Image: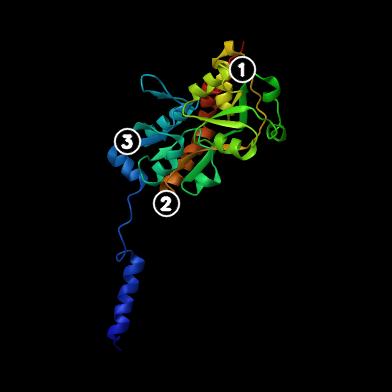
Amino acid sequence: MTLSKGIFAALVAFTLIFSGCGGATPAPSTISKVQKKGELVLGTSGNMTPMTRQLENGDVVGLDIDLATVMAAALKVKLTIKVMPLDQLATAVENGTVDVVLSNYTMTPERNAKVAFVGPYLTSGKCLITKIPDLANAKKDELAEKSNNLVVIEGSTSEAFAKALMKKATIIPSKSQETAIEMVRNGKADAMLTDFPICQAAVVNNPDDNFVSIFSRLTYEPIGIAVNPNDTHFINWTQNFLDRMEKTGYLTVLGEKWLSIPQQ
């Protein structure tokens, strides 16, 4: 029995489609690309001490940078750091400008629509840096009724939170953490709204400013690693890497190094 030309052609097409021979060549995985280049490109904002901070000499330090350094070592490549505005990080992952983002990066639904998240490796929340104790102790519903001047990091979840909740407050975006803290120091802002690690570092690093900050859990802030959503291999590798960092106690070591408050 012989097949008709039409049926034979259909079978050939079916075989080609499901064997992958008839489709486009799949894009190389992030891991193969990274290992071929010999570098893991990290995207970070560099303005959220103690998680990520760019020094005057251009070096970038922090808990996130240490974690990314170990990631690169595990892949046997060097770490290349690109500092960019917080609101550009998701796009940088999407278009391949960076391979991974670690930047005190909250796992929000909006960001998750653009990138895949692995984690969280840290759970935080919003708090205020201020010289006004009553403001630091205010609950979420009380803050909604206050008309204070609040400074926030531009493009951060703190900015979105403040604009959504604090309708009566004057929200002042700042491009740098240092500028925001200076505004609170000199009275140009009543408080800075940010994440708990930044609040903690500001209080500890500026003991003469009489800052007060209470971790009041105004929000739930899961901090994660952002990677390309289309690369299941790299997502899987990053999850396994993070699990190993947790089980071996390395994340605890990083927490003690960067987040612990020194004993007086």
Scheme of colours in the image:
rainbow
Judged left or right of residue 84, residue 107 is right
Identify residue type, mark 2. Answer: Asn
**Which of 185 and 253 lies nearest the eye of the viewer?**
185
Judged left or right of residue 177, residue 2 is left
Label 3 and label 2: CA atoms lie apart by 20 Å
Identify residue type, mark 3. Answer: Glu
Circle 1 packing at 10 Å, graded few (<14), some (14-19), many (20+), is: many
Give the SS element for disc 3: strand
Q: Position of residue 212 (x, y in %)?
A: 64, 19
Label 2 and label 1: CA atoms lie apart by 44 Å
- Which numbered disc flags the more N-terminal residue, 2 or 1? 1
**Which of 106 and 71 lies nearest the eye of the viewer?**
106
Identify residue type, mark 1. Answer: Phe
Q: Which residue is mark 1?
A: 211
- Point 30% across, 75% down: residue: 12
Residue contact at pointers 3 and 2, CB within 8 angstroms: no
Label 1 and label 3: CA atoms lie apart by 41 Å
Give the SS element for disc 2: loop
